[in-house]
Image (cartoon, grey):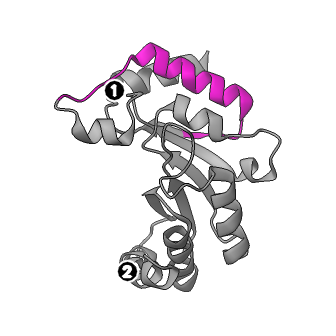
Amino acid sequence: MSREEARDYHSTQIRTFAGTHADLVTAMTLTNVPEATGIADAAREANVPVVLSFTVETDGRLPSGDALGDAIEAVDRDTNGYPAYYMVNCAHPTHIAPALDPEAEWAERLRGIRANASKLSQAELDEAEVLDRGDPAEFADDHRRLRARFPQLTVLGGCCGTDHRHIDAISRTLSG
C-alpha cells in the first residue's frame, strides 16, 4: 500500500475517532513505512494525535526489511514528527531488543511495547496449531531488561499468546 492509499484507507476510521472524545488513535502491527506515513497523514488531516506501532521479525527488522530505527526516522522526517510516539507490538521482547539502540535519537520516540508471549517467528505462529503462551515470569524479566535500558517505555501490555498471568508478572516485576 502506498502512502496515499494508506491515508485514504485509514482516514474514515481516523475521522470517526476524531469526532469523539478519543484522546488519540493508535495503529498497530505496522509492517512498512508507507502505510505508517499515510496513517500519520490521515491523523494530521483529522487533527487527532496518533501512535504508530511497528512489528518486527525475529531479527528485529520490520517485515519490509527496514530497521526499526530507520522506519521511525523516515516517518518522522516525512511527517515533520507528527506521531505522538511509537510502539512495537506483536513480537517477543527478545526479538525487539536487537532493534533498539539506547544511544539513538529515535529511541526516545519509542514509548511502548505490546509483546507476544511466544518466541516463535510470525511465520511459525501462523502455522502453529496450538498457541505458544511462553513463560510469564521469563516474559516479565525480558520486559524488566528492556525497561532498564529504555526507561521511557511506559506503555506496556501483551499481544499474541498473553493473558492476565503475563500482565500480572510484568506489573509485579516492574513495580518492585
Q: Classify 42 as above or below 93.
A: below
Question: In screen coordinates, is 117 left or right of 35?
Answer: left
Disc number at residue 9?
A: 2
Q: Is residue 164 magenta?
A: no
Question: In screen coordinates, is 99 left or right of 113?
Answer: right
The residue at 45%/61% (across/down) is 27
Say what amino acid the circle numbered 1 marks. Answer: His
Q: Quadrant of the C terminus?
A: top right
Say what amino acid the circle numbered 2 marks. Answer: Tyr
Q: Horizontal and vertical percent for residue 19?
A: 42, 79
Q: Looking at the image, is mark 1 or mark 2 earlier in the sequence?
A: 2
Q: Secondary structure at mark 1?
A: helix
Alpha carbon of mark 1 to alpha carbon of mark 2: how far? 33 Å
Q: Horizontal and vertical percent for residue 105?
A: 81, 52
Q: Secondary structure at mark 2?
A: helix
Instruction: Determine the image quadrant of residue 20.
Output: bottom left
Residues in magenta, as a range: 130-155
Residue behind mark 1: 164
Q: Classify 101 as above or below 162.
A: below
Q: Is residue 146 magenta?
A: yes
